[in-house]
Image: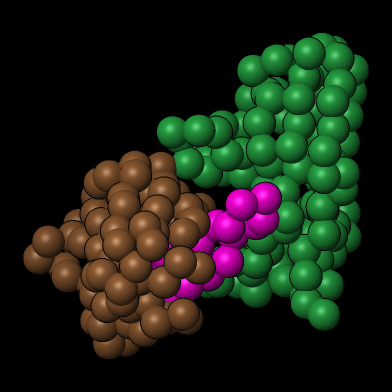
Amino acid sequence: AQSVTQLGSHVSVSEGALVLLRCNYSSSVPPYLFWYVQYPNQGLQLLLKYTSAATLVKGINGFEAEFKKSETSFHLTKPSAHMSDAAEYFCAVSDRSTGNQFYFGTGTSLTVIP
Amino acid sequence: EAQVTQNPRYLITVTGKKLTVTCSQNMNHEYMSWYRQDPGLGLRQIYYSMNVEVTDKGDVPEGYKVSRKEKRNFPLILESPSPNQTSLYFCASSFIRATEAFFGQGTRLTVV
């Protein structure tokens, strides 16, 4: 089975600072990779996804993520944090060969300090 | 509007009393799944369905049942709920496997 590791269950940044949320996956074959955001009392919303095209993926709200096969990583970044970015962020993977199951990381709670 | 609708949003029940959480999607998606979200554990997949009458276990299926008699509906059934099933539950759907999943608003279940 796949596994997903999100380093840092809580991350705090100042408004305007760089946001970096880390995600590493376990499989030797690169899976499909996703980042989701969850605002309080809401469901999850897709930020971006990597399937097999460009390794740098741009998503909504100014977020982007870079797929690095050698590091088995898919870290999420945003150049300048905004107060509205405060939320829970989940990295998820799906096996490329079967794709039947999604595996989620444990989540990273982002706090933005004014 | 494209959406996944779960009902109810909040539910408090007693141990052993059967309950059903409904999930419906209006996007003609083939793939549907149920997750539970617990603090520090992220989302864990309970069951998923690749199409009508095709269901399979996820990582934490014990104590749950599902059915997929119609493409749009994927109810989650707890036949004898226990307190360890107190959690936040999400239903999700996607067009085909491993593509963008659309999530419902969640159902917060408390079993006392």
Would you say residue A84 is visible in this rendering?
Answer: yes
Question: Which of the image's four quarters has the C terminus of chain B?
Answer: top right
Residue at (53, 40) in percent of width and height: B44
Q: Colour of chain B?
A: green
The span shown in magenta is: A31-50
Q: Position of residue B89 (x, y in %)?
A: 68, 41
Q: Nearer the viewer, residue B6 or B33?
A: B6
Q: Is residue A55 left or right of residue B5?
A: left
Task: Identify the residue at image location x=31%, y=52%.
Answer: A12
User: In this view of the protein, can residue B58 be seen by the observer?
Assistant: no
Say if the magenta span includes residue A33. Answer: yes
| Prevailing SS of the magenta stretch | strand
Residue projecting furthest to the left:
A70
- Residue at (24%, 75%) from the top-left corner? A66
Does residue B74 sit above or below A30 in this rendering? above
Q: Please state which of residues B76 and A97 is positioned toward the viewer in this rendering.
A: B76
What is the image's colouring?
by chain
Q: Quadrant of residue A34?
A: bottom left
Q: Is residue B101 magenta?
A: no
Residue positioned 65% across, 56% down in the render: A43
Q: Which quarter of the picture shows residue A9? A: top left
Q: Colour of chain A?
A: brown
Q: Position of residue B71 (x, y in %)?
A: 82, 64
Tally of numbered tags = 0
Q: Quadrant of the N terminus of chain B?
A: bottom right
Q: In the displayed orientation, state which residue is furthest to the front.
A: A114
Q: Is residue B21 left or right of residue A59?
A: right
Which of these two is toward me, B88 or A92? B88
Residue B55: x %, y % from top left: 69, 48
Give how far across and how far down residue B81 sits, in percent.
78, 19
